[in-house]
Image (tube, rainbow, N blue to C red):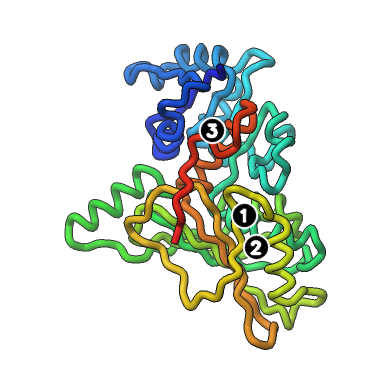
Amino acid sequence: MTSVFIDGAAGTTGLEIAERLTGRSELSLVILPDDRRKDDAARAEALNDCDIAILCLPDDAARDAVAMIRNDRTRVIDASTAHRVASGWTYGFAELVGRDTVAQARFVANPGCYPTGFLALIAPLVRAGLLPADWPYTVNAVSGYSGGGKALIDHFETAKADGNGIAFRAYGLAMGHKHVSEMKVLAGLAHEPLFAPAVVDAYRGMVVEVPLPLGAIEGAADPDRLRGALARFYEGSPLVSVSADAHSELLLHGDMPASDRLELFVFGSADGAQARLVARLDNLGKGAGGAAVQNLNLMAGLPETQGLRLAALG
């Protein structure tokens, strides 16, 4: 039996992970009492006693937690931004880096929610030479407000209760968002993408779009080839699908269920000169807690989808 300690279990991501681990007899969950959750001595003991620690902490606290580990045995899944491009850490997007790579890693950095959508679309196509690494890509994305954690959840829900609900919140307007380096490095790009994130009045769910003026991009493949390449790359994946259907719209529902799936779409103009690559996912699922549990399953030698939420997104 694999023992698991969630450091930061009371946060939004920690709660999502704990829900997916509830009732699983093949795992033993280490739980600190409420009055000791922030006690460094208790945390250090749990971190050193468990088989796998999942860190659901701010970046600096995640680095401190790793420093508390004094053995060469405890394995770590870090859900913060702290180690996603750090040396010695495996990027925990199993479909991109390989399931065996994640399974054998000691230190795994869980991907960010927005980067999950962007990288799922762009990284395989750049690797295949169907899109250039030196194009200045743009990422337009909207997320449910749970992605901002308890503070943003409270902000949206308080405003709604006061009768002045927030429908749309653009942010990251000063550029330099912390997800950008992750997108650039893991996709193998020459330039940081221009990232335009926003939050909408839905608790969970996310749409990430990369618009492509293919007619202006030297060496770029047409939309059908891009879609076909993605379909082949994710063929057989239990969590990632590439749609071949024609859609007139894509929706995020305010009451969508938790889901650990990731859906990819390629829309193209009739002449093939333009395309819109789109990813739809649950920011708390494949974008956070679901991905952490998928990585945990692989590291513990368990079926990849054990405990995951497989509800449809649309």
- Gap between marks 1 and 3, in whole Å? 19 Å
Which callout, 2 or 3, points to the residue nearer the camera?
2
User: Which one is in front, 181 or 131?
Assistant: 131
Residue at the farthest left position: 162
> Which residue is disc 3 drawn over?
60
- Residue at 65% x, 80% y is 274
Q: Position of residue 63 (x, y in %)?
A: 58, 29
Which callout, 1 or 3, points to the residue nearer the camera?
1
Cβ–Cβ under 8 Å for marks 1 and 2: yes
- Gap between marks 1 and 2, in whole Å? 7 Å
Secondary structure beneath dot 3 equals helix
Residue type highlighted by circle 2: Pro
> Which residue is disc 1 drawn over?
180
Residue type highlighted by circle 1: Val
Res 292 visible:
no
User: Which one is in front, 38 or 75?
Assistant: 75
* Mark 2 or mark 3: whose residue is earlier in sequence: 3
> Which residue is disc 2 drawn over?
193
In the image, is 281 to the left or to the right of 228? left
How busy is the neighbourhood of tag 2: few (under 14 within 10 Å), some, or many (20 plus)?
some
Secondary structure beneath dot 2 equals loop
Q: Is residue 103 above or below residue 285?
A: above
Q: Position of residue 104 (x, y in %)?
A: 72, 29
- Residue at 53% x, 47% y is 286
